[in-house]
Amino acid sequence: MKIAMWSGPRNLSTAMMYSFGNRPDMEAMDEPFYAPYLKASGINHPMGAEIMAAHETDPVKVAATCDAPPEQHRYMKHMPHHMLDGVPLDWAADCVNIHLIRHPARVIASYAAKRENPTLEDIGYSQQTALFERIGGYVIDSHDIRENPQAALRTLCEVIGLRFCDAMLSWTAGPKEFDGVWAAHWYGAVHRSTGFAGAEGPLPELSAEAAELCEKALPHYEALKTRKLLFKS
């Protein structure tokens, strides 16, 4: 089985990769289209030069790697805004496509702590709804996973036809061999973790510009939220 997990940044996506990557039958890939995205877009991201030097920047070669059959199962962490026009997407037809969502207020507050003045393009909400309309798949909300990881992951595995594994509920602290080089900038909190954090508290208060960005992203989040899986307790 090949699993393509699609989400914007700061969306529980790395914890989910660590969860699935901790299974003995699962190989993991960390944002393989990040380097091609940086090269094609010219956008200024933290560690951009290091990322392009360390990772494949040709999207056709990356797509071929994603399309290759895994030994058992493969989990791929992807971001919809990395899939610029012309980037191959036909490989996704052979994947179980899952769309991970999170309330934009939480995403914006977390993202802004790592990179100033995020835009709607940066956080990927419009690209994610467009991708869902194009390829379909399942929708899960990070709020539900943090509230009850075992119930959420059991239900998700049942729906996609994958045996649930207790190893998905915890992992060792520290970097992982499948981390991208950008982990040094973005993954500090998850490197200190050994499992999913507890249920989230109230939504953060946002400043004027951040609040405006949240208002733009919210309709995309709400549209996908109506499609989310309901987890068994």
Image (tube, rainbow, N blue to C red):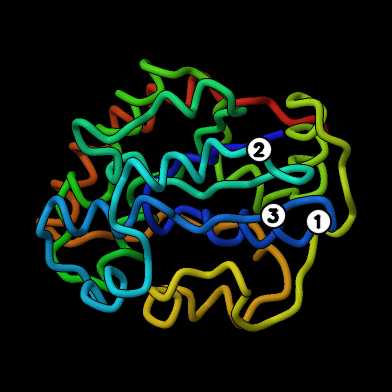
Q: Which amino acid is tagged 3?
A: Glu
Circle 3 is placed at which residue position?
Answer: 27
For residue 203, above or below residue 101: below
Q: Quadrant of residue 63?
A: top left
For residue 190, above or below residue 77: below
Q: CA distance from mark 2 to mark 1?
A: 18 Å
Circle 2 is placed at which residue position?
Answer: 69
SS class of the residue under badge 1?
loop
SS class of the residue under badge 3?
strand
Packing grade of label 2 (10 A; few <14, some 14-19, many >=20) is: few
Q: In the rendered image, which quarter contains the C terminus?
A: top right
Residue 208 is left or right of residue 93, and the answer is: left
Residue appearing at x 55%, y 55% in the figure: 29
For residue 154, above or below residue 223: below
- 71, 173: nearer the viewer: 71
Residue appearing at x 43%, y 43% in the figure: 7
Packing grade of label 1 (10 A; few <14, some 14-19, many >=20) is: some
SS class of the residue under badge 2?
loop
The mark total stands at: 3
Residue 60 x %, y % = 34, 41
Q: CA distance from mark 3 to mark 2?
A: 11 Å
Can you tell which of label 3 and label 2 is closer to the viewer? 2
Circle 1 is placed at which residue position?
Answer: 23
Q: Which amino acid is tagged 1?
A: Arg
Which callout, 2 or 1, points at the residue further toward the start of the chain? 1
Residue 83 x %, y % = 29, 39
Residue 69 is left or right of residue 110, and the answer is: right
Q: Which amino acid is tagged 2?
A: Pro
Circles 1 and 3, Cβ within 8 Å, touching? The answer is no
